[in-house]
Image: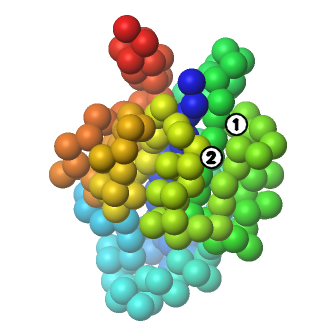
């Protein structure tokens, strides 16, 4: 089978990682339980930043956010390694900026995710991801962003939303932990 995965906030806990970085850089101590109530992709409001300031904070912190010790979600690496070992095709499709593609691919590999040549797609806007996903003729696709998943609902790919506070309104099958993927595959294999 062919599996497609978004990276940020799907395989790795990027927003929470960025939240810790914001606390450090802004010399604040906004508690994690506040993070867990944020209903938007953007995380700047609890720090008292305007949208413009929040966007700038993200841009100024991007390298640190993307390429430091951002943790993968529990079981994500192991489950993808197992899929790879079983001969399934794994594709990574991320909207990270093109200038970060090679470094992102290297970071993903060093984190332990299985990456094969020609199966890593980067440097596209969210709306461009849709064309890549369609062209790859995936069996399954996993993402956290409503605007990406909403545009794919009429496609033949089986969609799953990686559970986040900002996508609770979505009526798409939900993945809350990567250990659930084995059961998902069994369910669809019947």
From this viewpoint, is residue 62 visible?
yes
CB contact under 8 Å: marks 2 and 1: yes
Give the percent coordinates (x, y) of residue 50: 35, 89
Residue extending farthest top = 190
Q: Quarter of the image containing the C terminus? A: top left
Residue 135 higher or lower than 27, as above or below:
above
Look at 41% across and 91% down and name the residue there.
52
**How far apart are the two marked residues, 2 and 1, measured between alpha carbons?**
10 Å
The one nearer the camera, 101 or 43, is 101
Give the percent coordinates (x, y) of residue 186: 42, 12
Q: Which residue is mark 2?
A: 92
Q: Nearer the viewer, mark 2 or mark 1?
A: 2
The one nearer the camera, 98 or 136, is 136
Look at 50% across and 49% down and name the residue there.
134
Look at 58% across and 81% down and name the residue there.
59
Side of 35 where 88 appears, left or right: right
Side of 138 where 114 appears, left or right: right
The one nearer the camera, 99 or 149, is 149
Residue 145 higher or lower than 87, as above or below:
below
- Residues packed near mark 2 inside 10 Å, few (<14), some (14 to 19) or many (20 plus): many
Q: How is the image coloured?
A: rainbow
N-term mark: 2 or 1: 2
From this viewpoint, is residue 74 visible?
no
Give the percent coordinates (x, y) of residue 23: 49, 70
Q: Which residue is mark 1?
A: 113
- The disc placed on residue 173 is none
Determine the secondary structure under disc 2.
strand
Q: Quadrant of residue 46?
A: bottom left
Side of 180 where 63 appears, left or right: right
Q: Quarter of the image containing the N terminus? A: top right
Q: Quadrant of residue 109?
A: top right
């Amino acid at each position: 089978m062919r599996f497609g995965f978004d990276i940020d906030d799907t395989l790795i806990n990027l927003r929470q990682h960025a939240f810790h970085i914001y606390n450090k850089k802004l010399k604040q101590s906004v508690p994690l339980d506040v993070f867990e109530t944020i209903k938007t992709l953007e995380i700047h409001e609890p720090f008292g930043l305007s949208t413009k300031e929040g966007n700038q904070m993200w841009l100024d912190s991007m390298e640190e956010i993307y390429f430091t010790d951002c943790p993968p979600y529990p079981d994500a690496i192991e489950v993808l390694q197992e899929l790879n070992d079983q001969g399934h095709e794994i594709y990574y499709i991320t909207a990270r900026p093109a200038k970060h593609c090679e470094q992102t691919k290297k970071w993903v590999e060093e984190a332990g995710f299985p990456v094969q040549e020609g199966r890593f797609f980067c440097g596209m806007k969210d709306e461009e991801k849709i064309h890549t996903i369609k062209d790859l003729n995936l069996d399954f696709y996993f993402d956290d962003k409503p605007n990406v998943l909403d545009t794919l609902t009429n496609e033949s790919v089986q969609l799953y939303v990686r559970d986040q506070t900002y996508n609770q309104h979505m009526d798409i099958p939900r993945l809350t932990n990567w250990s659930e993927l084995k059961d998902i595959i069994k369910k669809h294999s019947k």
